[in-house]
């Protein structure tokens, strides 16, 4: 199992939330890889830069060096467009960033770790868990 860490989960880790950090490390000890998706990388990086949070930015850069950043493909964007169409047909709208995060997690077979499970529920093929 591969965990795709959502923006809010990385924020918890960077803020030192011990429960979330323990779950993340426990997963690593059990051979579960974690990845940072490209849109999540953007959301974290822009927030830390805008806040001038140099220490958290340094910690995030170390985390990124350890885990890497999984880049988007045209297929991910196509899947996000399909998800948008499905959601719109159900009278439900999601922003582009969340659609891209979901599509990338689905296409990689990742479990999306998020504190916002209700927002992502109902997307076909998306596995979700909450560590908070």
Image (cartoon, grey):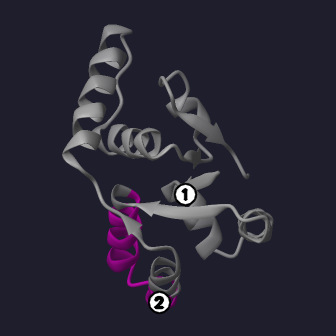
| Residue at image location 38% in from the left, 17% down from the top | 92
Q: Position of residue 7 (x, y in %)?
A: 49, 58
Q: Does residue 123 show up magenta in the picture? A: no
Q: Position of residue 9 (x, y in %)?
A: 59, 59
Camera-side residue: 26 or 122? Answer: 26
Neighbours of disc 2 within 10 Å: few (<14), some (14-19), many (20+) = few
Q: Main secondary structure of the magenta part?
A: helix
> Percent x, y for residue 106?
45, 38
The residue that mark 2 highlights is 58
Q: Secondary structure at mark 2?
A: helix
Judging by the rendered image, the residue that carries numbered circle 1 is 5
What percent of the width, then of the height, locates residue 127? 59, 36
At horizontal 74% and vertical 63% (from top left) the residue drawn is 27
Image-quadrant location for residue 90:
top left
Q: Is residue 76 above or below residue 6?
A: above
Q: Is residue 7 above or below residue 119?
A: below
Most distant residue in the left direction:
74
Q: Residue at x 78, y 71 (%)?
A: 29
Q: Which residues are magenta?
A: 40-58
- Place residue 72 in its image quadrant: bottom left
Tag in front: 2 or 1 = 1
Q: Which mark is residue 15?
A: none
In three-dimensional space, the C-alpha distance between marks 2 and 1, rounded to whole angstroms, equals 18 Å
Q: Is residue 113 above or below residue 9?
A: above
Dot 1: element? strand
Neighbourhood count class around disc 1 (C-alpha, 10 Å): few under 14, some 14–19, many 20 upward? many
């Amino acid at each position: 199992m591969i965990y795709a860490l959502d923006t809010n989960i990385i924020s918890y880790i960077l803020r030192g939330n011990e429960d979330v950090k323990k779950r993340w490390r426990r997963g690593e000890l059990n051979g579960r890889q974690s990845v940072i998706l490209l849109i999540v990388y953007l959301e974290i990086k822009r927030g830390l830069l805008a806040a001038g949070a140099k220490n958290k930015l340094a910690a995030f850069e170390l985390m990124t060096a350890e885990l890497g950043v999984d880049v988007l493909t045209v297929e991910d964007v196509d899947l996000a467009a399909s998800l948008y169409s499905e959601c719109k047909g159900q009278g439900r709208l999601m922003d582009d960033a969340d659609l891209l995060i979901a599509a990338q997690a689905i296409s990689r077979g990742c479990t999306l770790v998020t504190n916002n499970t209700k927002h992502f529920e109902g997307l076909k093929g998306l596995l979700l868990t909450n560590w908070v």
